[in-house]
Amino acid sequence: MLTSMDFIKSIIYEFLSYFVPEKVEYKISGECKKCGKCCNYMYSKDTYTEKEFKIMQMIFPKYKRFYIKGKDEQGNLIFACKLVTPEGLCSDYKHRLKMCKNYPAKKINYPGKLHQGCGYKVEEINFKKFLKN
Ligand code: SF4
Ligand code: SF4
C-alpha cells in the first residue's frame, strides 16, 4: 500500500537523480541485431521494489508499458515492455520512448553493460581523455 510519504520521497529521489553528474561517456559502434533482449530485460538504477516501480509509473505514465518480469540473483527488479513482440521487435516503433531511441545511451551516471550478443559495442572514453591530459 502506497503512502503519501512514499510518493513524496520517490519524487524527491527522482528529482535529485537528475543532478548526479554524468561520469561515464561511451563511444558507440555496431548496430542492432533486433534480438529484443533490451526490451525484455531492463533495469532501473533507482527502482528496487514493486512499490517503487508503481510510484515510478505514477510519476511517469509512459512507463506503464513496462511490467515486472522477475528479479536477478542480487534481487534487482527486471522489467519488460508489453509492446515487444515474440520475435523481439517493437510493435509501436514509431511511438517508442526517447530512452528506446537513444539506446544504448552515450552518457550514463552509473556503470552499464550491454546484453550478451547485442550488436552494439561500447567503449568508455573518459579514461582515454584522462590519460591524454
Ligand atoms: S539487445 Fe542490442 S541487438 Fe538486441 S535488440 Fe537491443 S540493441 Fe538490438
Ligand atoms: S517501446 Fe518498443 S523499443 Fe521501447 S522497450 Fe517497448 S518494445 Fe522496446
Image: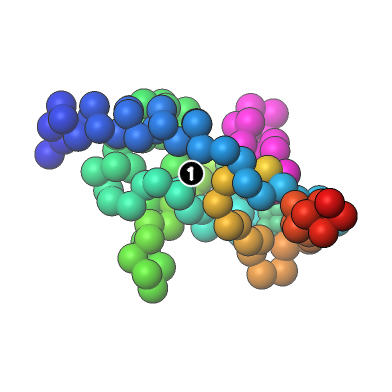
Identity, as a three-letter code, of the amino acid under mark 1: Lys
Which structural element holds mark 1? loop
Residue 32 on image: x %, y %: 78, 53
Which residue is found at the position 57% from the left and 38% from the top? 21
* 54 vs 40: above or below: above
| Residue 93 on the magenta segment | yes
* 49 vs 74: above or below: above
Which residue is found at the position 78% from the left and 54% from the top? 130
Q: Is residue 125 left or right of residue 66?
A: right
Residue 41 on image: x %, y %: 52, 57
| Residue 102 on the magenta segment | yes
Nearer-the-camera pick, 101 or 33: 101
The part of the image, by quadrant, that contains residue 98 is top right
Residue 26 on image: x %, y %: 75, 51
Magenta-drawn segment? 91-106
Give the residue at mark 1.
Answer: 82
Nearer-the-camera pick, 4 or 22: 22
Nearer-the-camera pick, 125 or 103: 125
Which residue is found at the position 47% from the left and 28% from the top? 62
